[in-house]
Amino acid sequence: MEKISVIVPIYNVEMYLRDCIDSIVNQTYNNLEIILVNDGSTDTSLDICKEYASKNKNIKVIDKENGGLSDARNVGLEKATGKYIMFVDSDDFLTPNSCELLYNAIKEHDVEFVSANFIFTNNEGIPWKKPMFSEKFQSRYLNIDEYLYSFYLINSTVWNKIFKKEFLDKNKLKFKVGLLAEDAVFTTLAFLKAKKTYYLKDVVYNYRQRETKKGNLSISFNGSVDYFKKVNKAYKMVYDNFKKYNQMDFYRYYYAKSICYIFYKLVDSIMLTDKEKIKILKEMKWFFDIKKEIGMPISSSIIDIATDAIINEEYDNVLKYCKILSESREYMTREKRERMARPDYSKYTKN
């Protein structure tokens, strides 16, 4: 039974941290190195980490100044001694046999990394009705040339995956500090460099939707101007990497999925003025302009129309579309809003 290093970046999550650590400590797989990286928390998160470390010899606590999520993960990677690497966000939690399932998959299929199914939960950790990927998607090898499966099943997060540490070290894969959507840069580059990957249909991860209230609407996202600026940089890195590796055929599908995601982030933001939204749209216009280059229809018709308006610099019309969508989404459940922002797999596979 080979060692898995589980890296947990931590910042001010005292409310959820015990659930997270308990889910790792109580795994059915026993040979774990649990690395808790306290990234300058100002609440009791560090005390909780020390408490668990005093009772579990396989827990390492690293206390550092605040440097952001990417920096905390990189520090954990530097200290990891396991043959395999997993990441868990400190407000989420694993299923009881998560490590065992992922370990067995990466060993049996001899791949650089495995990506598995996951499920959203509410604040209290109660799971939604359905996982991210439906039952029709069975466990299988994924190849960057098989767009119809790989574009959809290789999502941009790192926390539903297990990686060979040797693979990460050999390719010097680390997280870009100072970005948001850093997972997207990391995972897509890993996919570009990997010889083989595998999708596991089992649900291994519980992703908690932390929400605040706005009238009748529960919102887990309050995107600022700074958020979109940093995401813009990450999206450009992803685009440049696909260009560099001459994998634009795959990127066509990845792009069509990403544009749905970022557009609804803009729609759902409650922090931005109309003036700020237009500024963001202008700064990200290069990303929307790619639609002409790749010739890929967007899954949602309303986003397709809005994208054309952005390309034509009809920003007042875009704001109208955003307002209409925002008002309609106020009366939807969180789960329905999330599904609305997901790609329409059946439409993509026809192109």
Image (cartoon, grey):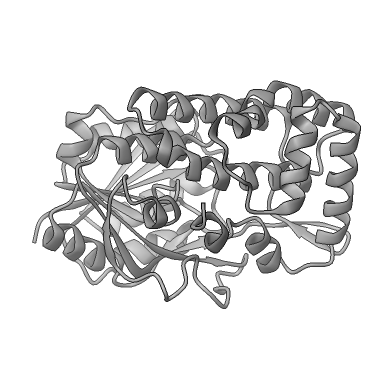
Q: Quadrant of residue 78?
A: top left
Q: Residue at x 46, y 44 (%)?
A: 10
Residue 183, compared with residue 196, is above or below; it is: above
Question: Residue 25 or 187: which is nearer the viewer?
Answer: 187
Q: Residue at x 18, y 38 (%)?
A: 167
In the image, 162: left or right of 329?
left
Looking at the picture, how far across and down is residue 215, in whole percent?
88, 60
Q: Total label count?
A: 0
Looking at the picture, how far across and down is residue 198, in whole percent?
26, 57
Residue 278, compared with residue 25, is above or below; it is: above
In the image, 1: left or right of 300?
left
Q: Residue at x 83, y 53 (%)?
A: 325
Question: Residue 294 or 44: which is nearer the viewer?
Answer: 294
Most extreme residue toward the left is 1
* Quadrant, the N terminus: bottom left
Q: Quadrant of residue 241?
A: top left
Question: Residue 258 or 146: which is nearer the viewer?
Answer: 146
Residue 337, compared with residue 267, is above or below; it is: below
Looking at the picture, how far across and down is residue 140, in whole percent?
27, 64
Q: Residue at x 28, y 68 (%)?
A: 27
Question: Residue 42 or 26: which is nearer the viewer?
Answer: 26
Looking at the picture, how far across and down is residue 227, in whole percent?
65, 32
Residue 344 visible? The answer is yes
Residue 208 visible? The answer is no
